[in-house]
Image (cartoon, rainbow, N blue to C red):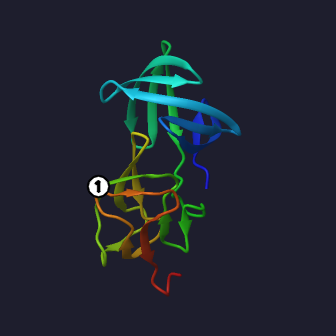
């Protein structure tokens, strides 16, 4: 699964590849070397292919607002955990689209959840994403606990769908 983002009404595929201190991204098939140095919670120095720029960022749910070179951009993260996507395997098994850290879990094993319920908050590359239930059912297992890191493809949560609904 490759995460997708919308910028200026165009959808872009962005895949993360880490190399030493730099981050290498593949954006629509083109490799981009990037380095981020966070100055504070909303300000960073972003170096892309050797060119450094000052960037201000703010996040609202799946929207990232960036102020760069006197212009403001809105970057929308498509729900890579949505139904029918590779991020959801076997009904209620949600896999990580990239490496990250679980910030907080809102559920525990045995909890009953409804489709759309918030399950956990994860962070990857300084961006926080709330993971929502793609189906209704019972939480069978969580892939990690708060503060723990996970790899790309790791199972974040497994929800068992009742037989009548499956």
The residue beneath circle 1 is 147
Q: Is residue 70 above or below residue 139?
A: above
Where, by quadrant of the figure, is residue 33 drawn?
top right
Q: Residue furthest front?
A: 20
Q: Residue furthest right?
A: 29
- Can you give x and y, in whole percent of width and height, for residue 103 in the image? 31, 52
Residue under the point 57% across and 37% down: 24
Residue under the point 64% across and 39% down: 26
Q: Residue furthest top?
A: 70
- Can you give x and y, in whole percent of width and height, for residue 130 in the image? 38, 52
- Can you give x and y, in whole percent of width and height, for residue 49 in the image? 59, 24
Q: Is residue 118 above or below residue 12?
A: below
Q: Is residue 152 above or below residue 123?
A: below
Q: How many marks?
A: 1
Residue under the point 51% across and 23% down: 47
In the image, 114: left or right of 79? left
Residue under the point 28% across and 58% down: 146
């Amino acid at each position: 699964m490759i995460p997708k983002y919308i910028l200026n009404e165009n959808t872009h595929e962005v895949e993360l590849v880490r190399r030493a201190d730099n981050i290498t991204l593949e954006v629509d098939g083109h490799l981009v070397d990037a380095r981020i140095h966070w100055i504070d919670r909303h300000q960073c120095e972003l170096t892309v292919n050797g060119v450094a720029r000052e960037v201000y960022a703010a996040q609202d749910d799946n929207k990232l607002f960036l102020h760069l070179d006197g212009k403001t951009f809105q970057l929308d993260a498509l729900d890579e955990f949505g139904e029918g996507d590779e991020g959801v395997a076997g009904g209620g098994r949600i896999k990580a689209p990239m490496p990250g850290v679980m910030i907080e879990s809102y559920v525990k094993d045995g909890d009953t959840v409804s489709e759309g319920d918030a399950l956990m908050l994860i962070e990857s590359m300084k961006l926080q994403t709330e993971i929502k239930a793609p189906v209704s059912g019972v939480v069978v297992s969580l892939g990690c606990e708060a503060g723990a890191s996970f790899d790309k493809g790791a199972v974040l949560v497994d929800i068992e769908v009742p037989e009548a609904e499956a």
